[in-house]
Amino acid sequence: MLTLTILVPLFGALVLASGTRLDARRARLCALPFGLVPLLLLAAAWVGFDGSAGAPAFQHVVDLPWIASLGVGWRLGVDGISLSLAAMSALLFVAALAWPQVLGARARHWYAWLLFLQGVSLGVFLALDLLLFYVFFDLSLVGMYFLIGRWGHDDAPRAALKFFLYTLAGSLAILLAILGLTLGDAPLSFDMRVLIERQPLDGGGLRATLVLLGFVFGFAVKTPLFPVHTWLPPAHVQAPAPASAILAGVLLKMGGYGLIRIPLSMMGETFARHAPWLAALALASILWGALVALAQSNLKQRIAYTSINHMGYSVLGIAAAGSMRAGETPARQLALSGAVVEMLAHGLITGSLFFMTGVFWQRRQDYEMAHYGGLAGNAPKLAAAFIVAAFASLGLPGLAGFVAEFQIFAGTFVLHPWMAAIALLGVLVTAALFLQMVQRLFFGTAPQGQPAFADLRGVELAVLTVLLALVLLIGVYPAWLLLPIERAAAMIVGG
């Protein structure tokens, strides 16, 4: 099942790349079935997932030999964290494939790259072998590089190059850290389950610190955290809307997921010793991302900086979960569960916001907020969708963002009260920047000479309805999502 989840979109990419010339509509209709199959397979995996206390940590496991002499295998499997992130990613890819784009003669190549990126991205979340994880992690850079560089806006090649070089530097640091973690530990194995059980570098020392630094640096670039975040805003601004939605909703999550799956799970004691420094970086990202976002007049750039802010909350929860305080296991579990839900909520909410920036670009080819106003009258459906996403992003109760942030703050407050208090300041700034954005775009007086603005059309409305309905469902009834995540969090932090 999990093998097909990865291979079907990769096969679809090959079919589209090597096929005959297709117009945009036919290429999209050809690509959609290949993108839908992984979502359906992951839905089946979710239904068949056993979240009870006695169930194994990883389920639906595939373990086939690949490079036996190195202990490397085609190992796939899911726990509650990886299953939820993979399912959300598959949904966002289906949304990106369905989203209408003006592509011209290169339509089939656009959809081929999207399917390729879907296959390797799902591989990151499903891999149970460290080397396989790295292969998929690295290949995701290639897919996004071409989506930005070939189909982006005016300065897209430069933004794509900056994205690639930054994230490649981070992935190389991760490779060195993987080698430092595994080499010298006999018998040699890249099996994540074995490494989680062994905790190979729990003795501490310089080697353990350097390995942790390599992982933190590499995943911080991907997340991204301050100060290695500068590649993100230009990449978002220059990327087409579906690529921005995938970048924010899927690729950034690889950084947070990597922190949970590798250093937190495999280097527990070393991670705990350095968790306060990671939490400090998260706080800097929360405040910097919110304050800089508030200063942006470019719609897409403002939303891009809010991603730095929101991923900072997620990393704060991960750092709190890694703090080994006696008797505080429930708080650590709560913080880790909140960190994962924050990644899911951010993927759905910010993915929706970036899809909506595509509506602005297709109608006007302009992201400057000052050039808009009073759109609620002309585009009430867009206004309603944008307002729901904005309020979810600022953490309004009843929506997914509140569930995530409440868990993070509650867990962090027990462990580090002053950090939670500082992080709350970011919520105030986030509320201000989103309310100001809604006011500028949809209410007030429209600029003189502003042309008519078409409301959401059929496919656009359908995509946003599905994504935002999930945001509402998680906010009103989160139990169905929290059960498998909390089970995995308990396995990681103990208890």
Image (tube, rainbow, N blue to C red):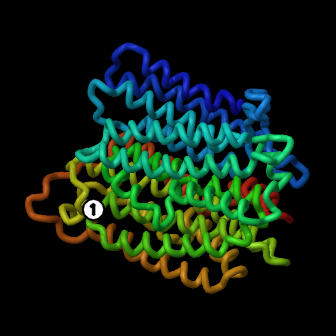
Circle 1: element type: loop
Image spot of residue 137 (x, y percent) = 57, 42
Residue placed under numbered mark 1 in the picture: 298
> Is residue 472 in sight in this rendering?
no
Q: Depth check: 308 or 246 in front?
A: 308
The quadrant of the image that shows the N terminus is top right
Q: Amino acid at mark 1?
A: Asn
Q: Residue furthest top?
A: 20
Q: Quadrant of residue 49?
A: top right
Which class describes the residues within 10 Å of circle 1: few (<14), some (14-19), or many (20+)?
Answer: some
The image shows residue 473, relative to residue 146, as above or below, that is: below
Is 193 positioned to the left or the right of 312 in the image? right
Q: Depth check: 415 or 469 in front?
A: 415
Is 434 positioned to the left or the right of 84 in the image? left
> Is residue 19 in sight in this rendering?
yes
The quadrant of the image that shows the C terminus is bottom right
Q: Residue at x 61, y 80 (%)?
A: 420
Q: Residue at x 65, y 75 (%)?
A: 276
Image spot of residue 294 (x, y percent) = 35, 73
Q: Residue at x 37, y 50 (%)?
A: 162
Q: Residue furthest right?
A: 54
Q: How many marks?
A: 1
Image spot of residue 99 (x, y percent) = 39, 39
Q: Residue at x 61, y 73 (%)?
A: 277
Is 225 positioned to the left or the right of 482 in the image? left
